[in-house]
Image (cartoon, rainbow, N blue to C red):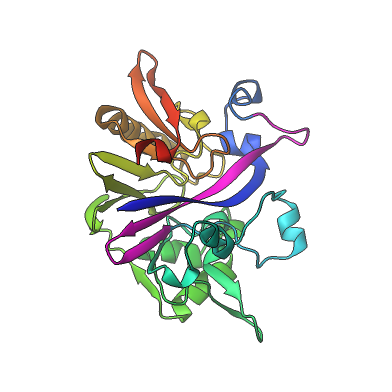
Amino acid sequence: MNLHVIDTGNFKLDGGAMFGVVPKSIWQRTNPADPNNMCNWSMRLLLIENGNRLMLIDTGIGDKQDEKFFSHYYLSNLKSVEQALNAKGFSIDEVTDVFLTHLHFDHCGGAINRRKSGDGYEPAFKKATYWSCENHWKWATQPNAREKASFLKENILPLQESGQLKFIDRQSDFVVNAFPDIDVLFVDGHTESMMIPHIKYGDKTIVYMADLLPSVGHIPLPYVMGYDTRPLITIEEKGKFLQKAADENFVLFLEHDSVNECCTVQPTEKGVRLGETLILEDIL
């Protein structure tokens, strides 16, 4: 197995929204804000080479929306998924599987492109199978008022129309060997049935954190995003996960932390806290 970090750029979100009830005087120590109270966040993807499979986890924000939409997010160093893959020596047509942790626009926007000729949309990865979860798919295609702005139909519906969409069966909250060397944890606090892949790499477990842990600044249990639909469930899920991560020395791959690519956690008198920060290359 080979792992590759795929960088598709940064965007900004309101710091208060990202930390919920935690005061700015505290969260700005780890995530400093600009004069508009906006913090910088990455869109860091993971590419997994394993046998004859080349799997990409999440796809970034894409480029389909209009200038007004993107102006809210202060994009910087933006790269298309194709550009980011090419920079690592891969072609978009080599990708066999696209694993979407959930269908919020900053995680799945790059999965679908505008058609180069004519109207409408088409899959960016024409030879890949796209993986979601049926529970989450229903949640995203029949969105609640709180999340409606995050589920953009042009990012989602063409996946099914293409015939390339498949669902991972949520047989339990933790599905072992959903793919070779990849287990999947399902969590429901941020959104219904978000999928957190656990990658077995030698004697290590590398966990792609998606929005269960956006940054090292979110490790303390009460540090929960205002975007989470069920914050108390997030706290419970995060608590169980972080304890296991500390006990088993997981490496946490951080999709949104603009400074830290990976980290570990450790038990302390105050609960589970940051262990060390590292880059994925350190363990490969």
Q: To which quarter of the image does residue 102 belong?
A: bottom left
**Residue at image coords 57%, 33%:** 19
Residue lying furthest top: 269
Residue lying furthest bottom: 118
**Location of residue 152 with respect to 273 vertically, above or below:** below
- The stretch in magenta equals 32-56
Q: Where in the figure is residue 105, as x and y percent of width and height?
A: 57, 58
Q: Where in the figure is residue 26, as x and y percent of width and height?
A: 60, 21
Question: Is residue 144 visible to us here?
Answer: no
Q: Where in the figure is residue 121, as x and y percent of width and height?
A: 59, 78
**Residue at image coords 65%, 25%:** 24
Depth check: give the residue in front, 58 or 238.
Answer: 58
Tell me if 230 is positioned left or right of 205 in this view: right
Question: Does the magenta run of residues contain 25?
Answer: no
**Residue at image coords 28%, 58%:** 170
**Location of residue 47 with respect to 33 vertically, above or below:** below
Quadrant including the C terminus: top left
Question: Does the magenta run of residues contain 39?
Answer: yes
**Location of residue 119 with respect to 11 vertically, above or below:** below
Depth check: give the residue in front, 196 or 239.
Answer: 196
- State the predominant SS element of the stretch in magenta: strand
Q: To which quarter of the image does residue 40 belong?
A: top right
Q: Where in the figure is residue 72, as x and y percent of width and height?
A: 73, 51
Question: Is residue 245 visible to us here?
Answer: yes
